[in-house]
Amino acid sequence: MGRTDRSGSEPGEGQDMDAADAAFTSLLEDSAEELYEHAPCGYLSTLMDGTVAKINTTLLDWLGLDRSQVVGRMRFTDLLTVGGKLYHETHFAPLLQMKGEVSGIALDIKASAGRRMPVLVTSKVKTSEDGAPLLIRTTVFDARDRRAYEQELLRGRRAAEEARRQSEADRERLQEALAVLQQSLLPAELPAVPGLEAGSYYHTASPDLLGGDFYDLFPLDTGRWAFFLGDVCGKGPQAAAVTSLTRYTLRAAALHDADPVSVLTTLNTVLHERYRSGEGRYCTAIFGVLEPADGHADVRLASGGHPSALIQRADGGADYLPTPGGLLIGVLPEAPFVAARTQLLPGDTLLLYTDGLTEARTGPDRALYGEDALRTFTATRPSAGPQALVTALTGLLASFGDGLDDDTALLALGVPAALPTTTSENPT
């Protein structure tokens, strides 16, 4: 059996325990004063008037001062920068007096070499047994890393704010440019047509995107006027390019042959040839010709996949003008279009619109507004001419709120209502 020491331990174990005991004894020999002097934070004690009575080496090193320069000669506020001293007098000291303890207050001290050093200060008033204040014990923590972090956060916040302002300014400029471009795709104003009245409106769903809705009214020759309204598939610059091509083609085709079926056929050929080799581009459109006459206007029109025109009659009621057989324009190399005819009497109004109106979401169940609701709305409006009808529809669009999520174009054409005849009698 192996030899054991007096405690019964195996050889070697007693030596390890002796070393541990020696280390522990060495720690006990470290005085509290020595731990205080070289702590990782600053310590000081002051009289109630702020005169420094005790200060540790750590804080003296930060200040770049000797103990003889500070103890009994300086007050705590003498260690602070001008801003720190002002904050101490206006906030720190009053709080300490009221509460007897203040924790984690940010101040700046005058460090060595004239530097300013950010610190966090905690102070507590020590009192006697009868509650009389004796002295103030203060702990000072180095906050340079924290200040640098806060400054970095501040710089980041300022940079983010500047980026936000720049982004908003860029967005405003973009919206202005888009608005100008959008207006270039629409007539600046409708021309005055003898014997007719006209009204129009364009709602942009998003100021950040170019819409594809379009309309126009222009003269063909003496006594005849052409009109069209349509909707290009998609949004953005590509849709704007198709819109521009479509408006130009419709105008040019109408001057060559104003027959509505012929005009839409030409547009179908142009769009199909232009875009067949890449991503398909197409549109819906109604094209028509108006010919004012005595007390009425003859209308011929054709539609390519577009919602039917709606007629508000002077004698009350409203109904759609059927345009069957029209396909989307530009999808197929050949598309059948069928012409329709009608006559507008005094007080009648022909309404063209894009599907943003009838496909708006309404009510708690977000149902489509629909063509039936539009016909009912129009029928219940007083027959007061195209502009009055457009104004009423503008209010309807506004009532949809966020349920109106698509661009919407309106074009209304009509014959003015006949003025009532009056008779007068000469007095005798």
Image: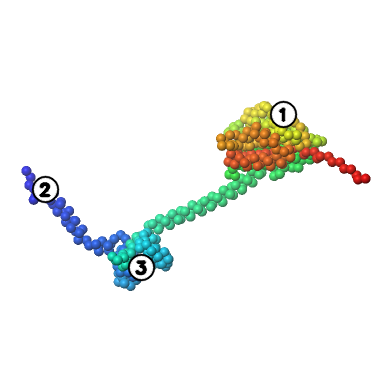
| Residues at marks 2 and 3, CA–CA distance in whole angstroms | 57 Å
Residue hosting label 1: 339
Q: Nearer the viewer, mark 2 or mark 3?
A: 3
Q: Nearer the viewer, residue 399 or 428?
A: 428
Q: Name the residue at 69% across, 44% down.
A: 188
| Dot placed on the residue nearer the N-terminal end, 2 or 3 | 2
Secondary structure beneath label 3: helix
Q: Is residue 400 above or below residue 23?
A: above
**Left or right of residue 368, residue 340 in this image:** right
| Residues at marks 3 and 1, CA–CA distance in whole angstroms | 97 Å
Q: Picture quarter containing residue 374?
A: top right
Residue hosting label 2: 9
Residue hosting label 3: 76
Percent of width and height locating residue 187: 69, 42
Q: Picture quarter containing residue 397?
A: top right
Kind of residue at disc 2: Ser
Q: Name the residue at 70% across, 38% down.
A: 381
| Residues at marks 1 and 2, CA–CA distance in whole angstroms | 115 Å
Q: Crowding near pointer 3: few (<14 within 10 Å), some, many (20+)? A: many
